């Protein structure tokens, strides 16, 4: 979908006409560390926001920058208004980058110095689950693990010269939920009667490892599915090594994980005992209770 309805949230000299954003820099004077220069000017950033909310799929744009010192970033804020993640051309590190501000990690590659002034640059960010890939002119520049919550699509522009931004497009997909559990009738009923209906009503597509139909090794499919999912649900009622392996991998990449367990289990394994676990009872009343609890958990993730 081509985004036409765009608003300027910040930037006096930034204008929008027919979906084309024109940024003309504003400067602020600050004291310089250079003894020969009393003050220096730094450019102020503009912030624009589209009409769509985005967390999963593909977002892209094209831009032209007159000066090398330029930043054009897709960014996502949390519920407190603080930036959680950003991706694109960073003025801060002077490179194409993906920022995971939750872990203070940055991955970068390339530079605007490789392009001529006012040369058209296409920028595309693909997010599937926690796997984020940044493409510049269809070439993969960097890849990083981030977990983006659904929020308004925001673009921040900072430059010492004029920047023109256009062809902003968004192709959203429904977030995926990967379910990890033992494949027996008891758990199949929980999966089919509770997890799938609640997850789909909340806005997730659901998949389980026994639903793979490919020639690749099963472990490869599982790891790919965990990475490309927004969250996982894991039933830890029985001591199933495969389930705990997949939970460990999900925790290692900071994947939101919902642990569920039947109340018949007396004691949780030590390594997961400190994690919040949703206990359920295998009864009609228990079914209603876990439906309500699971819905709340999923609504906080999407």
Image (cartoon, rainbow, N blue to C red):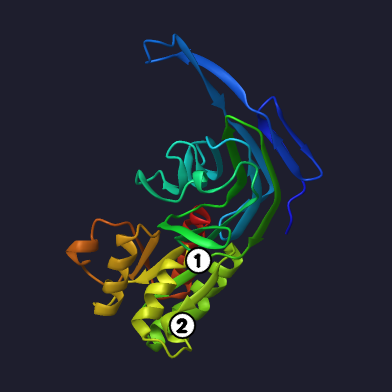
Which residue is farthest right? 18
Q: Is residue 286 left or right of residue 112?
A: left
Which residue is farthest front? 116
Q: Whole-percent x and y of residue 211?
A: 47, 85
Element on which disc 2 rests = helix
Q: CA distance from mark 2 to mark 1?
A: 13 Å
Please name whichever residue, 57 or 295, is drawn nearer the observer in this view of the structure: 57
Quadrant for the N terminus in the image: bottom right
Q: Is residue 17 left or right of residue 202?
A: right
Q: Which residue is mark 2?
A: 189
- Which residue is found at the position 77% from the left and 48% from the top? 4
**Image: 274 above or below 244:** above
Q: Which residue is mark 1?
A: 291
**Image: 227 above or below 241:** above
Q: Is residue 283 left or right of residue 262?
A: right
- Which residue is found at the position 54% from the left and 37% from the top? 68
Q: Whole-percent x and y of residue 216?
A: 41, 87
Q: Whole-percent x and y of residue 225?
A: 44, 73
Residue 142 appears in which quarter of the rendering?
bottom left
Please name whichever residue, 117 or 270, is drawn nearer the observer in this view of the structure: 117
Q: Say which label, 2 or 1, has the lower sequence index.
A: 2
Question: How many residues crowd mark 2 within 10 Å: few (<14), some (14–19), many (20+)?
Answer: few
Dot 2 and dot 1 residues touching (CB under 8 Å) = no
Q: Is residue 236 visible?
A: no
Q: Is residue 153 left or right of residue 36?
A: right
């Amino acid at each position: 979908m081509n985004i036409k309805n765009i608003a300027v949230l910040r930037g006096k000299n930034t204008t929008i006409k027919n979906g084309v954003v024109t940024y003309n820099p504003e400067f602020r004077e600050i004291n310089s560390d250079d003894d020969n220069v009393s003050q220096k000017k730094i450019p102020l950033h503009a912030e624009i926001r589209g009409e769509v909310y985005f967390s999963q799929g593909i977002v892209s744009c094209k831009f032209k920058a007159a000066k090398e010192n330029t930043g054009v970033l897709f960014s996502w804020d949390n519920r407190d208004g603080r930036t959680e993640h950003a991706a694109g051309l960073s003025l801060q590190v002077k490179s194409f980058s993906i920022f995971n501000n939750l872990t203070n990690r940055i991955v970068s590659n390339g530079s605007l110095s490789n392009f001529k002034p006012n040369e058209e640059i296409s920028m595309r960010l693909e997010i599937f689950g926690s796997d984020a890939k940044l493409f510049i002119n269809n070439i993969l520049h960097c890849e990083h693990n981030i977990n983006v919550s659904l929020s308004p699509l925001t673009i921040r522009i900072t430059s010492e010269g004029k920047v023109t931004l256009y062809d902003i497009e968004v192709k959203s997909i429904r977030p995926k939920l990967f379910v990890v559990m033992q494949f027996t009738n008891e758990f199949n009923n929980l999966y089919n009667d509770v997890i799938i209906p609640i997850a789909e009503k909340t806005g997730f597509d659901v998949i389980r490892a026994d639903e793979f139909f490919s020639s690749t090794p099963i472990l490869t499919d599982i790891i790919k599915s965990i990475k490309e999912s927004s969250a996982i649900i894991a039933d830890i009622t029985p001591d199933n090594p495969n389930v705990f392996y997949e939970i460990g991998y999900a925790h290692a990449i900071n994947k939101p994980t919902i642990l569920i367990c039947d109340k018949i289990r007396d004691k949780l394994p030590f390594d997961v005992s400190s994690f919040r676990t949703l206990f359920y009872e295998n009864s009609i009343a228990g079914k209603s209770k876990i439906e309500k609890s699971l819905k709340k958990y999923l609504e906080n993730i999407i």
